[in-house]
């Protein structure tokens, strides 16, 4: 018998918001990531199946299986991301056992002598490695973590520095995997509206209107230079400075290697520097090579727009793994402690250290697929299309809706794909709208990155905490106040733009608001300072002090 009644989700599309909000609220409230994501997955599958038990279980299985097998073939993108994570864990383990991590940390301590210096290193690397957000999130932490651990920078602060210097830089840079792809999305929209501007020109101008990304980077460096620690971050930093506890002792830490693995002494810093340098060169070469092969063009933007990021990560990963293995056997072959089974144990432990991150990623991908099928993003986009607000005041609205969409779906790309065409359609249909097309693009890109930064189900948030060796929920909670401050400043900027039509005034308002916020926080909350100060705050966090000030949690 054919069904004639509409599905519940068709009659009440607002219900499409329930699964992501349920997962997010449970994650924040219970701090149990897997269980919370599972609840969101079941809720989404039940809505799609209209409450049927068999249909719900079928949808859950389909969401899981499609990560590995889709449309009759291996889903290479997701599989290769997982393979790269495992490879990175093995590289980290081999570098650790060869003595490279310890040697690099000791060498860096003679150059980077302060906590601020360690944070500058992490933020600087994050800003410089802008070719891809996934690569940035995972690679920067592996290099910066030994230094930040020695200088008692909490893992939560390191995760914030990585996360807030990856997507904001990547979305602003035309010569990145994001920039090139966004240019490809914008091109047909610009042509359809009839704006006389090149595709790259539209991207560069929209980058100038991306107030959130600009604000996030300004606040990032203000936080490093002025030592601004607010909200839960202050607790994490206080404990790290006073006791050496880089994270709470009861937290599950992704990418954290066991202390039982042997370390060769004396180590050599090239055992860390060379493998990760080869990794970086390999990934960049892979990005350009796969892009050249797919596009048939030597133009840098064409190559970046058509690159295969997942394959490129593994090209670099394999080269880095071979290099790390070479140095491991070079330094340990004469050491009787290192037998054949020792290397095997290191490989297994390295891969196992990435399993917590992989488990969260799998659940986040499943939830994302089900949310896409529910049409959560499309529903939020329809709210923008149906509004009666004037074109100029749509700019701040697009920023907020893009943020809500990315927060609920866990992906900034979903917001890009849905809201950029909607912005073009709206601006192309109203008087004077063509002049607002580029600011509308900037607002959508800004909101998408903001929502992605705040979402506990975002893959880049998960990978940033993995790269830093930080508990995922701790990273989300400690980053929220900074993301909220940047978003508030950006929203003020968009309101100023809508009221005056001046993009310059909008960015000036954004920067002024951030400077005011930073100065106020600096006046209200003094710097935590070097180790030994503010011990009372660390004691309140419940972490006992280490007997040896150098005895910090093992860095991978």
Image (cartoon, rainbow, N blue to C red):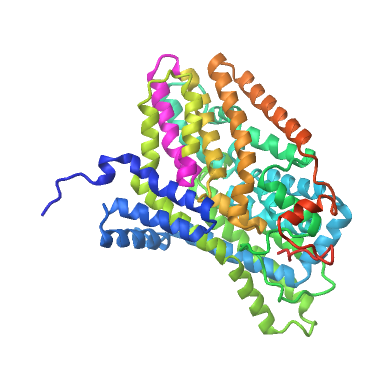
> Which is the main secondary structure of the residues drawn in magenta?
helix
Q: Let me know if residue 413 is in the magenta part.
A: yes
Image quarter in which the N terminus is found: bottom left
Closest to the observer, 547 or 89 = 547
In percent of width and height, residue 19 lies at: 40, 49
Q: Is residue 140 above or below residue 211?
A: below
Q: Answer yes or no: is residue 242 visible.
A: yes
Q: Residue, x 53% and y 18% (percent of image)?
A: 498
Direction right: furthest residue: 110
- In the image, which residues are magenta? 405-433
- Tell me where residue 395 appears, x and y as whole percent: 50, 24
**One can see residue 282 in this view:** no
Q: Position of residue 458 (x, y in %)?
A: 52, 49
Q: Quadrant of residue 492?
A: top right
Q: In the rendered image, which quarter contains the C terminus?
A: bottom right
Residue 107 in the image, given as x and y percentages of width and height: 85, 60
- Is 522 on the left-hand or right-hand side of 421? right
């Amino acid at each position: 018998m054919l069904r004639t009644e509409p599905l519940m989700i068709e009659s009440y599309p607002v219900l499409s918001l329930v699964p992501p909000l349920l997962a997010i609220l449970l994650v924040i409230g219970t701090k149990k990531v897997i269980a919370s994501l599972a609840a969101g997955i079941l809720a989404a599958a039940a809505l799609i199946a209209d409450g049927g038990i068999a249909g719900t279980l079928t949808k859950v299985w389909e969401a899981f299986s499609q990560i590995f097998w889709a449309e009759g073939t291996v889903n290479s993108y997701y599989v290769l991301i997982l393979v790269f994570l495992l490879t990175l864990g093995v590289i980290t383990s081999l570098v650790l056992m060869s003595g490279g991590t310890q040697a690099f940390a000791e060498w860096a301590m003679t150059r980077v002598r302060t906590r601020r210096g360690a944070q500058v290193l992490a933020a600087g690397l994050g800003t410089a490695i802008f070719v891809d957000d996934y690569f940035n999130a995972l690679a920067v932490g592996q290099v910066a973590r030994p230094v930040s651990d020695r200088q008692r920078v909490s893992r939560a602060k390191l995760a914030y520095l990585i996360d807030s210097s990856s997507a904001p830089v990547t979305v602003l840079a035309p010569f990145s995997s994001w920039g090139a792809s966004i240019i490809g999305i914008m091109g047909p929209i610009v042509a359809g509206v009839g704006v006389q501007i090149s595709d790259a020109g539209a991207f560069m101008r929209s980058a100038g209107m991306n107030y959130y990304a600009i604000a996030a980077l300004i606040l990032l460096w203000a936080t490093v230079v002025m030592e601004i620690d607010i909200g839960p971050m202050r607790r994490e930093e206080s404990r790290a400075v006073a006791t050496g506890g880089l994270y709470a002792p009861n937290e599950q830490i992704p990418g954290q290697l066991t202390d039982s693995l042997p370390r060769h002494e004396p180590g050599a810093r090239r055992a860390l520097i060379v493998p990760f340098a080869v990794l970086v060169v390999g990934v960049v070469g892979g990005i350009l090579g796969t892009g050249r092969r797919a596009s048939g063009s030597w133009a840098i933007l064409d190559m970046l727009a058509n690159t295969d990021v997942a394959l490129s990560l593994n090209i670099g990963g394999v080269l880095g793994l071979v290099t790390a293995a070479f140095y491991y056997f070079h330094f340990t072959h004469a050491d009787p402690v290192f037998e054949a089974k020792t290397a095997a144990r290191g490989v297994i432990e390295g891969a196992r250290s990435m399993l917590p991150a992989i488990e969260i990623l799998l659940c986040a991908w499943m939830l994302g697929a089900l949310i896409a099928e529910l049409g959560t993003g499309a529903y939020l986009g329809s709210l923008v299309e149906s509004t009666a607000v004037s074109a100029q005041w749509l700019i701040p609205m697009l920023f907020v809706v893009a943020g809500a969409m990315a927060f609920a779906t866990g992906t900034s790309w979903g917001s890009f794909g849905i809201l950029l065409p909607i912005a073009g359609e709206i601006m192309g249909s109203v008087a004077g709208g063509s002049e607002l097309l580029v600011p509308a693009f900037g607002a959508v890109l800004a909101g998408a990155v903001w929502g992605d930064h705040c979402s506990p189900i975002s893959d880049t948030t998960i990978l940033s905490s993995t790269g830093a060796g930080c508990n995922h929920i701790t990273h989300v909670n400690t980053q929220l106040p900074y993301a909220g401050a940047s978003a508030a400043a950006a929203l003020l900027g968009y309101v100023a733009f809508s009221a005056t039509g001046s993009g310059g005034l909008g960015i000036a308002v954004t920067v002024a608001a951030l400077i005011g916020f930073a100065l106020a926080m600096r006046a209200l909350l003094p710097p935590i300072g070097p180790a030994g100060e503010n011990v009372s705050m660390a004691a309140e966090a419940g972490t006992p002090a280490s007997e040896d000030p150098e005895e910090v949690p093992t860095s991978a």
